[in-house]
Amino acid sequence: MRNNQAKSKRGVLLVNLGTPDEPTAKAVSRFLREFLSDPRVIDLPALPWRLFLNTVVLPIRSPRVAKKYHEIWGEEDSPLRTSTRQIAKKLTERLSIPVKVGMRYGNPSIVQALLELRQERVEHLVVLPLFPQYSSSTTASVFDAVTRAFKNCPALPHFKFIGDYHTNEGYIQALAEKVKSHWASNGRSQKLLITFHGLPKRYVKKGDVYEKQCQTTAALLAEALVLQTSDWELCYQSRFGKAQWLQPYTASVLTALPAQGIKSVDVISPGFPADCLETLEELCIQYRVLFEEAGGQVYRYIPALNEDDMHIDFLADLIRI
């Protein structure tokens, strides 16, 4: 039994949220329709929500979001897809096993990635969603998609699903080293903002652990950096719609800081392992303007871990466990 298991081929399905195929209104609309039709993401009654989505949300938001994607799009592809593929490539080299990228929404799909792994005769599969903090709207949605894809498999692989890694020592140390390196090159600002993607409060009331895990990650990062309470602040970005989301909102914090005498800030978003629209456009462009218009003077975004060696090291260790 042990010998057969040792000889069986291992592989990794690396999952990220997804990205449009191109920075156009048509492609963005197609991506947003898939994303916002997921009941894990929008937990409203399906029929009225889809009517509102198709007649109001998509026609209005798609052109606006497409312009934002156009501002940050790379020469050949979106930063999210490019970085995720680079992470997968480095993990393949580090682990000497196939690592395939599947996007929860858009391309390459989870079904496509699983098919490629099956073609490589992978029998022991690790599913790693690149969501350090668990949420039903992200991690659980990936689990749903993977198990649906398995329904068409004549022989199921043995698989391990990594639900979160918000307290992983390698993850926290990689974040801390990223901040330290940034400070060594650029100097240290008066305040470090640790911002996470927001979530409607109703999800937490239903039992979602996302808020607690964000709080834990932020506290561990502050501890690793030996920060005092006044040196850092936890906040939440990317609010959508009129519902109450997790607070404080990053935008509100940034506009209030200059009046408190905080004229320089460093911003890091630990929930995004790869840079994307929310970091490169929202954090780097939108929020810089907000801070400077409120009287701020120095605004620095600390990039995501992306394909940094420490990031690859801890992900490889996580997969091996």
Image (spheres, grey):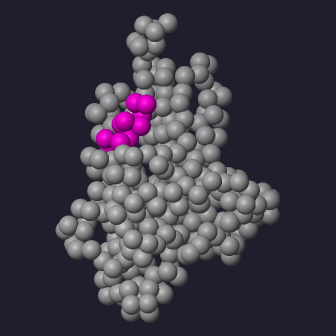
- Residue at figure coordinates x 38%, y 86% from the top left: 262
Q: Is residue 108 above or below residue 66?
A: above
- Residue at figure coordinates x 55%, y 75% from the top left: 249
- Residue at figure coordinates x 38%, y 80% from the top left: 288
Q: In this view, does 20 lie above or below 55?
A: above
Residue range (magenta)? 312-321
Tell me which secondary structure the magenta stretch mostly adopts: helix
Query: Within the magenta stretch, is there residue 314?
Result: yes
- Expressed as whole percent of the image width and height from the top left, the position of residue 232 reads 42, 72
Image-based side of 109 in relation to 77, left or right: right
Image-based side of 82 in relation to 242, left or right: left
- Expressed as whole percent of the image width and height from the top left, the position of residue 172 reads 39, 52
Q: Is residue 137 visible?
A: no
Q: Is residue 250 visible?
A: yes
- Expressed as whole percent of the image width and height from the top left, the position of residue 233 reads 46, 72
> Observer-nearest residue: 90 or 35?
90
Marks counted in the figure total 0
The image quadrant where one finds the C terminus is top left
Name the quadrant containing residue 293: bottom left
> Observer-nearest residue: 109 or 155?
155
Image-based side of 274 in relation to 152, left or right: left
- Residue at figure coordinates x 39%, y 46% from the top left: 169
- Expressed as whole percent of the image width and height from the top left, the position of residue 266 reads 35, 73
> Observer-nearest residue: 24 or 238?
238
